[in-house]
Amino acid sequence: MKKNRKFQYLAILLTLVLSFGYIRNTPVQSQAASKKTQVKKIKRTYSKFLKRHEKPYFRFAVLDLNKDGYPELICMGSTVLNKDWRIYTYRKGKMRRVSIPSKGDSYTTSMAYNPKSKSIYFDYSGASAWMGDSYRLKGSKLVHLHNFFWYHERRLIDNKKVSYKKINKWYNHYAYKMINFQQNTSANRKIYL
């Protein structure tokens, strides 16, 4: 009788352990599969958008700017003197345009990204000055982090004078990498989306 009871307790315990392990692992696996499905859906939406807008946006890049696991679409159009940058994100089942703050008469000559700090850098540099702003994506908005200006001996971070050593340290810390834009062609959309 004692042996049967021990066997019954052992069987119940084993059943509980196995069922707990099954219950615990199932949502995680289905959540990962769900995320992959969602990313594919987002990329299909971006591809359709780019197909409809081949003329104004002749280049694009897809990056996970805020490291939430879902990609953002960065489009680059161009006029003679200005590049037209657009960032799109996918929230609550819809593609949404991220507003990029205007710099008045300045125009963005290039855009770079730092995955470590999750920040984007808009460069407004001219022939003799280096200037720009860095932002971080929060939801569907860009939040301003820093502004930079460097012209010969005049170096400013957030409108405060800094030494050459400090601005060089900042530059090396953020180490922005230029975003690799692709031509907006059907072949590239298949490869990169």
Image (cartoon, helix red, strand yellow):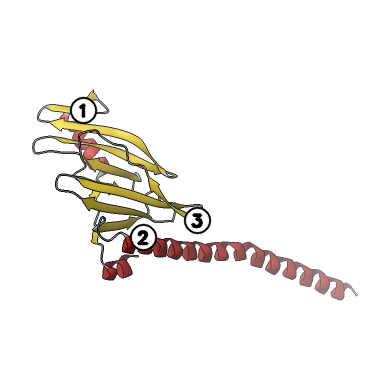
Between 70 and 85, which is closer to the camera in this rendering? 85
**Viewer-nearest of discs 1 and 3:** 3
Q: Which amino acid, by three-letter code, is at mark 1?
A: Leu
Q: How far is disc 1 from disc 3 in space, using C-alphas?
A: 41 Å
Q: Quadrant of residue 184?
A: bottom left
Residue 99 locus on image (x, y percent): 36, 42
**Residue indicated by mark 1:** 156
Going 23% across and 58% down the picture, which residue do you hit? 58
Going 65% across and 65% down the picture, which residue do you hit? 21
Residue 129 locus on image (x, y percent): 12, 34
Where disc 1 sits, the SS reads: strand
**Residue indicated by mark 2:** 49
Q: Which amino acid, by three-letter code, is at mark 2?
A: Phe
Where disc 3 sits, the SS reads: loop
Between 146 and 15, which is closer to the camera in this rendering? 146
Residue 169 locus on image (x, y percent): 22, 36
Q: Which amino acid, by three-letter code, is at mark 3?
A: Gly
Are there few (<14), some (14-19), or many (20+) residues within 10 Å of tag 3? few
Residue 186 versus residue 176 in the image, above or below: below
Residue 143 versus residue 95 in the image, above or below: above
Are there few (<14), some (14-19), or many (20+) residues within 10 Å of tag 2? few
**Residue indicated by mark 3:** 93
Q: Quadrant of the C terminus?
A: bottom left
Residue 156 locus on image (x, y percent): 21, 28
**Viewer-nearest of discs 2 and 1:** 2
| Label whose residue precedes the other's in the sequence (2 or 1) | 2
Image-based side of 148 in relation to 43, left or right? left
Q: How far is disc 2 from disc 3 in space, using C-alphas?
A: 15 Å
